[in-house]
Amino acid sequence: MTVFMACSPQKKSVPLEDGVSKELAEFRKERLREVKYAMSFDIPAQLSESIPASLDLYFELEGNDGDLYLDFSDRSENLLALSVNGDSTDIDHQMEHIRIPSETLVEGANYIHIDFIAGESSLNRNEEYLYTLLVPDRARSLFPCFDQPDIKATYQLTITAPKDWKVMCGAHETARKEMGEALVHEFGETDKMSTYLFSFVAGKFQAVTENPGSFDMELFYRETVEAKVGPSVPEIFRIHQESINFLEDYTAFPFPFQKLDFAAIPIFQYGGMEHVGAIQYKEPNLFLDSTATDNELLGRAKLIAHETTHMWFGDLVTMSWFEDVWLKEVFANFMADKIVNPSFPDINHDLLFLVSHYPAAYGEDRTQGTNPIKQPLENLKYSGTLYGNIIYHKAPIMMRQLEAAMGKQAFQMGVQEYMRTFQYGNATWADLIGILDKGTDVDLEKWSKVWVNQTGRPEITDQIIYDDKGLISSFEISQEAEDGGNHFWPQLFEVALVYDEEVLAFPVEMNEPTVSLEKAIGLPEPKTIIYNSNGFGYGVFPVQGKDLVAIPTLEDDVARVQAYINVYENTLAGKLEPLVTLGMLKTGLATEDEDLIVRNIIGQISHLFWTYLTDEQRDQYQKELEAFLYLRLHDELSPNIKKALFGLYSSLAYTESAREQLFSIWSKEEIISSLRLNEDDFTAMAMKLVLFEHPETAQIIEATREAISNPDDRERFEFLLPAISADESLRDQMAKSFKEAKNREKEAWVSTALDYLNHPLRQEGSIKHLKMYLDLLEEVQRTGDIFFPKSWLNSTIGQYGSEEAYQVLESYLAENPDLKPSLKNKLLQAADDLYRVNRMRN
Ligand SMILES: [Zn+2]
């Protein structure tokens, strides 16, 4: 017999998992409206005591067809009481969610009250202050909420804190009441914002209020050095105002929120965080004294302009889901450049853009483990895996191309429409492209498909034909995807034809896979051709062996550094011999006087030297290179360049004679003029001497121990000693100790220790641990912070080039076919050189 159930409305449910799944987010987005959080936090004077809190949550429900889930990732015991629409309800907390049964809810207005203990993992509590930092998905660690960027809400806070503390949040303070030893601060209702933008700061701060033009702004800070505070405070206000003026004009949208205050935090995770109405900054980046260099001043101005830009790009219009997080970051940098660069006319901004973004973007995009700018995200708890060089360095290059392809005016008009359309709401990259598309002939959807959704780089080739008089009769430029795929990157760049007397630069509009450079037809054969001479294009550009001689003599800084980059990329691609390239880079160093280019060349030399030369080649070339650097260090050079050259010199002074020279610099027997070395530099030098097994090792260690003045630095030195020891058994012991998660906690130190343990000079003894390091990878991801798995890999497998290491890698990949793709990609990124070197040698 079959029983038919009476027809009842289907109850919808979402399969629960930790974090915030996309499915759960979509379920809530469809149903929730008008969300408001009214919260109180009672901050005690004692750091050891917990923070009692309560939440009154108001929202409208469209369709009550299933249980609702609030996110709360802290312990269940911290949830004290729950009532829904006035009725006390049992607390059902599992998999980081509080279930609100649909029976307790109604269509329309609902009200939930929760008493709880505030979760502390994102509260950054110190003796004298605390601050919330809830990006990307940590609001749910502090209080129960709908933690997803597309459920915007208002917040109304009451914060009780010790009497001598000040409090800042996204709304104005409306009342202050004494209560025993504490003060109760009441705030008005904030503007609408996403959970990751909610914040408060409380503690012992100095506060200063100024009106730099638009309205009163308040600054909290703890810096005490008057030489920094005096000149910095007015600048901090001025740059915020300058940024607001520019952005209001550019976006045609007035400053979108009720206020703009900022707090300088002594130790802060990032440069800054764009909380609505209450930006947080890393204090040392804001407070500079009169010795600050142009670059430091530029850095501060860009940081402030970046965070202020976020008030529009990110806060006013927010990505719908974190997979578009790159978009707000790229806009913030893009606008910061526009706002700030004109105030620093002495800096070559095109050069700075090139060296800051291209090598880093290529470093990931040339590998098999690269990812597109936009990556899918199934659950907010994986947001951390999205961050990397592609977001931070390829996306800005893409955006600059996009603006150039459309034209600045059309681009700006599109941005204005985007602001108007999605104000106080959410939008995706597709929404922006949809709007921009109307203002241009460029097919932006197609354009975006390859630049944003596709991985990798184009490889550019040329075909030049000369007639019988030696004049150019045909000049064709083509591109193919480096990874062999069927993609084409529309882009603009320049090609420079270099003659003895002049350089002729021609724009190339590469909107087809093959284009003809008509303007070059009829010209005589140039001495050399520099592709992408304006540093605007993206890809691997061709280099002829004969070009190498001319590169160091190129006058234009951007063309010169681009030429070095082209040579380097061709070397890694196996088209030029590493030793030939090293020779050319060394020649460049002999005359180069632009600091940024010197640093770029030094990075290239160091990488090729340690990774691409065989042991025999390296030992042979070392003598020549080291002698050259030692001589160059005695030339008349700027302190910055000298410091950079010394870094390279000291890293490869491992032969007996070089080691002695380094020892005499370390022991101050030899002083090199204008080389400014501080305590950290002497510690680093001492560690190199130990690594290179100087006979006076015991004395060097003892003297260094005594010389280090900061106890944290001394602890670090002691931690690293086994990693540089000449005693292989000590090194083995340290390597094995990293199997225990607790020995990996100081991640920055562990990475440095691994760099030393797997140093090319020590690989004969260290390769036996390589398999263990790889086997630990998944665990390292589970227990470590978001950037640690990559640095773990860079410091282990990333240091090797040998056939033996290649075999270890291959068998690890064969044994672990189910390795999570995001992790496998990190491994393929780190092992990129290993693949290349083995391809070159076989
Ligand atoms: Zn940002």
Image (cartoon, rainbow, N blue to C red):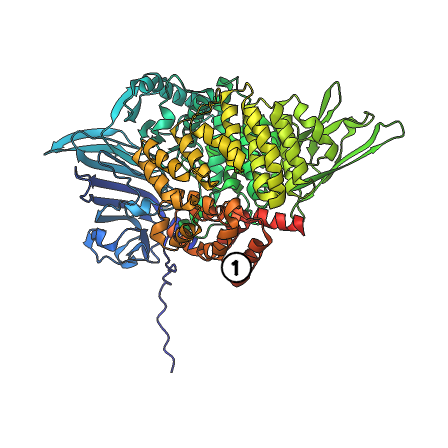
Q: Is residue 154 left or right of residue 433?
A: left
Residue drawn at point x = 34 percent, y = 36 percent: 705
Residue furthest to the front: 695
Q: Nearer the viewer, residue 9 or 262?
A: 262
The answer to which image quadrant residue 271 occupies is: top left
Residue 842 location (% of width, % of height): 67, 52
Q: Above or below — where is 369 with respect to 589?
A: below
Q: Residues within 10 Å of mark 1 (few under 14, many from 20)?
A: some
Q: Nearer the viewer, residue 302 or 11?
A: 302
Q: Answer yes or no: disc 1 within 8 Å of ligand 1.
A: no
Q: Nearer the viewer, residue 388 or 527?
A: 527
Residue furthest to the left: 180
The answer to which image quadrant residue 569 occupies is: top right
Q: Is residue 174 left or right of residue 820?
A: left
Total of numbered circles in the picture?
A: 1
Secondary structure beneath dot 1 equals helix
Which residue matches tag 1?
812
Q: Is residue 676 left or right of residue 835?
A: left
Residue 405 location (% of width, % of height): 62, 32
Image quarter hosting the N terminus: bottom left
Residue furthest to the right: 468
Q: Is residue 588 left or right of residue 122?
A: right
- Say if residue 284 shows up in the picture: yes
Q: Nearer the viewer, residue 504 or 634?
A: 634
Residue 706 location (% of width, % of height): 32, 33
Residue drawn at point x = 65 percent, y = 50 percent: 839
Residue 546 location (% of width, % of height): 74, 32
Which amino acid does the dot numbered 1 rest on?
Answer: Tyr
- Say if residue 566 shows up in the picture: no
Q: Above or below — where is 73 with respect to 498?
A: below
